[in-house]
Amino acid sequence: MSEVNSQKSNKKRTLVLMLLTLVYGFNFVDRQIVGILAPYIQADLDITNTQLGLLIGLAFAILYTLVAIPIAWLADRYSRVNILSISLAVWSGFTALTGMATNFTQIALARAGVGIGEAGGSPPSHSIISDLYAKEERAGALGVYSMGIPFGIMFAYFATAMLMGETNQDVNWRRIFIILGLAGIALAVILRLVLREPKRGAMEVAKDQKIEQPPFLESLKTLLTIPSWWFMCIGIAMGSFVSYSFSAFQTKYIGAFDPEFNFRTLVIVLGIINGVAYAGGTYMGAKIADKWGKKDIRAYGWLPAIAIACATPFAIAGFWVPTVWLHLVCSTFLLLFLGAYLGPCFAVAQTLAPINMRAMSTALFFFILNMVALGGGPSTTGWLIDWFASSNNELEATRYALTTISIAFGLSILSFMLVSKYISKDWRLAEERIVRATKD
């Protein structure tokens, strides 16, 4: 009987994980679609590369990161399911409003609204997953959740291909935003009806034990004194600084490189690459981290460092090869390696955090990640393109800017090596905190 109950429990938590992954996918659909449709938005609204970078970066990231912390504080105390459902409905509604903008100010405000909504996505989701999977399985589970990134990006490309017209010029970007926004609102209703709130700390504390919630400043102080947690945040932030920059300006680069390349073919191929290479790298990276981490906990730092080191030459070469197809081959290997660090990083953020600070851990994690990567990457790249364009054509300016941005990979590798240096001690201290919590 207990085996039957165990199987039912496993099926139930798998369903929850799949649903949360789907929601995370919508997060990246709404985020990626701006970069995909950038050439058409830029032409329609007559905005500069710097403005485009701000639109994809800071206009979204500032409110996303600032609002995430108070939402995480709420998620550590109140219903995470309610917070997640409301957040999904909010960001999807603003996605639809993005398609109605007629100038830069209006579209910037709409993207800021998307950022406010998406701030309530990952903190409660990470916390729920950590209550369903023990720490030995957590990297794998969060790796599956992380596959919402490549699958969301893949769907964004496929949706563009399905909803665009017959030619490169026949792309109604407004209609695409409105349809995707309405689909997200429908998913928010389903999420609220299906998902149930799990017990906090279910994998670490007794069934009838209550979890005390510390003050905000205490949570902040505790998390920021864990060295490997801090270096992990810097590592993923610098790696994502490059990847967000690439995704924001890739279609623009290819359009300048070969204006005759069919846009529908391009978005379908990029969708497949994200769905296969990026998702495959994410899944394998999480599984390898779980297996390797059981033998040596330092693997949670080594694996991301190795993955970023392998990704770097493909990142740079991709903008200097002679054809679009070779660029896409480089992109395939780049995304394969970039996916590998997501699961280990998310696992470290959750496992090193005290049980009653897990949503806050995710919020601070994303605060650093998104202010540096999402806010800084596209914004810096857009400014660099305009700066290089003063003495180069559009293609060369974009190529020089994206090559320069790749330098951040070196800082990412260094940060992950520092994670491997400190994580053994920090992991042991995290286990001791759990023991103390279960005895209180």
Image (cartoon, grey):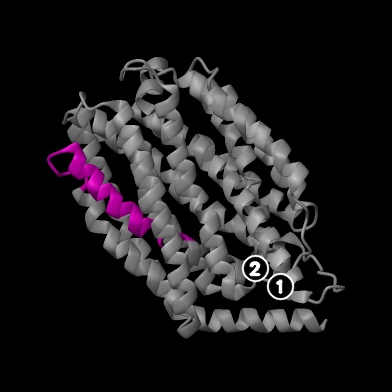
Q: Position of residue 189 (x, y in %)?
A: 73, 36
Instruction: Reply yes or no: does residue 326 show up in magenta.
Output: yes
Q: In the image, what residue occupies the spot 33% across and 69% down?
A: 306
Q: Nearer the viewer, residue 133 or 6?
A: 6
Q: Nearer the viewer, residue 210 or 292?
A: 292
Question: What secondary structure prevails in the magenta region?
Answer: helix
Q: Are marks 1 and 2 in contact (CB under 8 Å)?
A: yes
Q: Nearer the viewer, residue 171 or 423?
A: 171
Instruction: Reply yes or no: does residue 51 show up in magenta.
Output: no
Q: In the image, what residue occupies the spot 51% across and 55% down?
A: 146
Q: Nearer the viewer, residue 190 or 303?
A: 190
Q: In the image, what residue occupies the spot 38% across and 46% down?
A: 274
Mark 2 element type: loop
From the image, tell me which residue sits under label 2: 133
The mark found on residue 203 in the picture is 1
Q: Which residues are magenta?
A: 318-342
Looking at the picture, does residue 252 appear above or below residue 79?
Answer: above
